[in-house]
Image (cartoon, grey):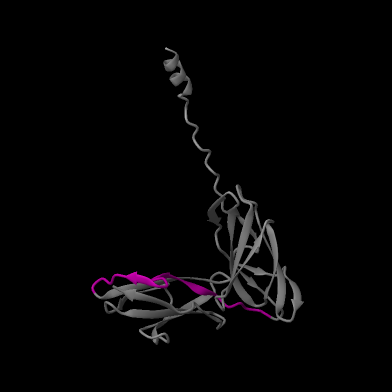
Amino acid sequence: MPVILLLMACGGKKNNPVPIPLPVKALLTTPAQNAVCVTGTVVSNGKSSVSFTWNASASTDSYDLVLKNLLTSASTTQSTTSTQLIITVDQNTPYSWFIISKSNQTSATAQSDAWKFYNSGPGIVTYSPYPAEITSPTFGQAVMAIAGKINLSWTGSSVTVGTIMNYNVYFGTTNTPPILKSAVTDSFVNGVAVISGTTYYWKVITKDNAGNTSDSGLYQFTVN
């Protein structure tokens, strides 16, 4: 009987581990989405400092701010434990930015939405459209052709809504592709003929009604 009581006393309920809370994505505040940034402070010729702010996110110890120059495609990352960073950027240049929320308790992260803005400068009356965002095929994607054809698609946007006039689409098998179709008013070109096992390159030039242009950058993909 004493042995039985001892076994019963030792048999306890196992404690379940407490789950580690995951960081939550931050909500961006300034510069606002698609804004012409006029609040920057001029620091030198062609440069101004811009304040980036966002709301604090739950279960987060630090933040990475990822800033991309949409003309050069160059990206920089800066870290902070605050919800604000002041960064010096080029004037008359479009940018995109987003925040990565990080926790000391886990390697998991949360990424905010990506916003675009235009850092304006003196003497600018019109603003170039944002570079087109390639949606399909994306960079390095392997695609399956249907009856030897694929579709190309992208998304266009500009500081001033409704100013995009058309797109020129370049497509080919070299990294300097020839023009496939000009003055496209849609954001897609369907039924493009391709050959299986071939790598293709393509890009989109956006043009607005003031004659300003922007380049999506060169993308490549392979047809299975």
Q: Magenta stretch: residue 137 in it?
A: yes
**Is 121 on the left or on the right of 23, as rendered?**
right
Locate the N terminus and report the quarter of the image it occupies. Answer: top left
Camera-side residue of 77 and 35: 77
Query: Going by the image, does 167 lie left or right of 62?
Result: left
Q: Residue 150: percent from the left, percent from the top?
A: 31, 73
The image shows residue 46 at horizontal and vertical percentages of 70, 80
Q: Which residues are magenta?
A: 124-147
Instruction: Count every numbered label the image shows and give the total.
Output: 0
For the point 54% across and 55% down, which residue is it?
Answer: 109
Looking at the rendering, in which quadrant would you find the C terminus? bottom left
* Residue 108 position in % (x across, y down): 52, 53
In the rendered view, tell whether residue 63 sits above or below residue 12.
Answer: below
> Viewer-proximal residue, 156 or 50?
50
Q: Residue furthest top?
A: 1
Q: In which quadrant of the rendered view does residue 78 lie?
A: bottom right
User: Which residue is pictured at 40% across the width and 77% down the height?
Assistant: 220
Q: Residue at x 64, y 55 (%)?
A: 62
Is residue 100 inside the magenta stretch?
Answer: no
Residue 144 in which image quadrant: bottom left
Q: Residue at x 47, y 78 (%)?
A: 166
Q: Nearer the viewer, residue 82 or 26?
A: 82
- Is 13 or 120 nearer to us in this picture? 13
| Residue 3 horizontal/vertical position (percent) | 43, 17
